[in-house]
Image (cartoon, helix red, strand yellow):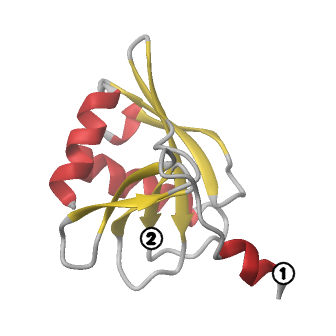
Amino acid sequence: MISSLLSKRALPASESALRCSENGNMREERMSEALAIRDVEDGCIVAVRVHPRAKRNAIGGLYAGALKVSIKAPALDGRANDALIEFLSRWLNVPIMRISLIAGATSRRKTLRIAGKSAAEIEAALVEVC
């Protein structure tokens, strides 16, 4: 009961972000924080929220400040991590070796380093998909 009340509480208007809607249009939705992505020396670092055992591999927009990615592979023996890196490499047109898992090997919330892509390029790719 308390958790359902907390999930329905309104967020301030300043705490909003873009999200991909079901019909493919971008819409503004209240979120707890914006997409956690930052540039580093030779690429960028991205926060990702993974949904393993999904019906299909897809980008689901934003979830709690992270890029939400649905992956068909189960979260067993690192299969979902490997499938995530493979899916993102195809989506971003970068070699698999340029994407590395920094943190969250056993968690749904992961931090990835993507060499050769800036934060602006990742955000532009997200807008194209949605």
* Residue at point 38%, 32% (across, down): 98
Where residue 81 sits, quadrant-wise, is bottom right
Q: Comparing marks 2 and 1, which lies closer to the viewer?
A: 1
Question: How far across and down, in percent of the image, does residue 60 sit?
Answer: 38, 66
Q: Where is residue 20, by image quadrant? A: bottom left
Position of the C terminus by quadrant: bottom left
- Whole-percent x, y for residue 65 in the image: 53, 49
Q: Give the camera-side residue of 27 and 116.
A: 27
- Horizontal relation, residue 109 to residue 21: left or right: right
Can you see residue 115? yes
N-terminal of the pair, mark 2 or mark 1, is 1
Left or right position of 5 against 30: right
Mark-to-mark CA distance, 2 and 1: 30 Å
Rate crowding at label 1 as few (under 14), some (14 to 19) or many (20 or more) other CA atoms within 10 Å.
few
Q: Nearer the viewer, residue 61 or 88?
A: 61
Q: Residues within 10 Å of mark 2 (few under 14, many from 20)?
A: many
Of residues 5 and 108, the one drawn nearer to the viewer in this rendering: 5
Secondary structure under badge 2?
loop
- Identify residue for label 2: 71
Residue drawn at x 21%, y 40% is 124
| Quadrant assignment, res 69 | bottom left
Q: Position of residue 125 (x, y in %)?
A: 22, 45
Q: Among all residues in the image, which is located at the extreme top?
A: 41
Q: Total of numbered circles in the picture?
A: 2
| Residue kind at label 1, given as amino acid type | Ile
Q: Which residue is mark 1?
A: 2
